Image: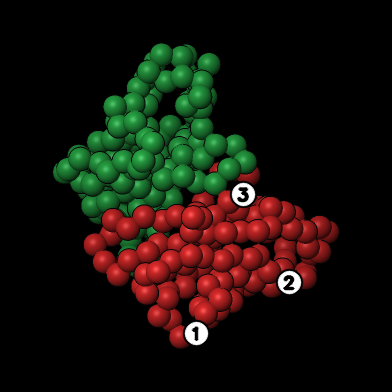
Amino acid sequence: GAVVSQHPSRVICKSGTSVKIECRSLDFQATTMFWYRQFPKQSLMLMATSNEGSKATYEQGVEKDKFLINHASLTLSTLTVTSAHPEDSSFYICSQREGPEEQFFGPGTRLTVL
Amino acid sequence: AQKITQTQPGMFVQEKEAVTLDCTYDTSDPSYGLFWYKQPSSGEMIFLIYQGSYDQQNATEGRYSLNFQKARKSANLVISASQLGDSAMYFCAMREGRNQGGSEKLVFGKGTKLTVNP
């Protein structure tokens, strides 16, 4: 199955700073990647769908100017949390679909904003 | 309306026993896929099993099987011979649509926390 990596695995930052999270597909060229957010003891909520070479599609209620997504190549998508605040502290996890029956997830990035 | 419903916030099972985790779904699309994932405390999402809406037989993967009842819109996960390492959160998810383009999103239920007791 597909291998998806994320970097960093954990980040702590001060309020007001920006944080970039990388999601890499190691063995599959993904035209589409998905970014999810998971608050403690909650389910995964889709934030946006990242499309290679075009603009991302954001879910309702997700601020596109705050969560910048770039999918410049078939193996890399990045999520930048701009001007992070404590309420942005969460577990961010990317995912790619390899076929109709498979969807794999990265190991996730735990963001803590002080 | 919620697309995926998992009514069991927590479940307990004795080691070596079987356990069923419930999942019901709501869709009007005739083409869809159902997924189960395991999430241990480390946070990674581990794919367990997939069932397509047109599949005639219930999916099985080792100790995992999916009890697919299409008319009732249920897709329960059965774990046989539970092991201590099975303790984790389990999420049911659905993808709708017959478009194979790859942009259809996966929607998750709230999850069930399974605890396997020795």
Residue toward you, A78 or A81: A81
Can residue A66 be seen at all in this image of the molecule? yes
In three-dimensional space, the C-alpha distance between marks 2 and 1, rounded to whole angstroms, equals 20 Å
Crowdedness of circle 2 by 10 Å Cα count: few (<14), some, many (20+)?
Answer: some
Looking at the image, the residue that sits furthest to the bottom is B56
Identify which residue is drawn at 73% across, 71% down: B18
Q: Which residue is mark 1?
A: B57
In three-dimensional space, the C-alpha distance between marks 1 and 3, rounded to whole angstroms, equals 28 Å
Which amino acid is tagged 1?
A: Gln
- Chain for mark 3? B
* Image location of residue B12, percent across then percent down: 77, 59
- Chain for mark 1? B
Chain shown green: that is: A
Figure quadrant of the C terminus of chain B: bottom right
Q: On residue B40, which mark appears?
A: 3
Which amino acid is tagged 2?
A: Ala
Q: Which residue is mark 2?
A: B18
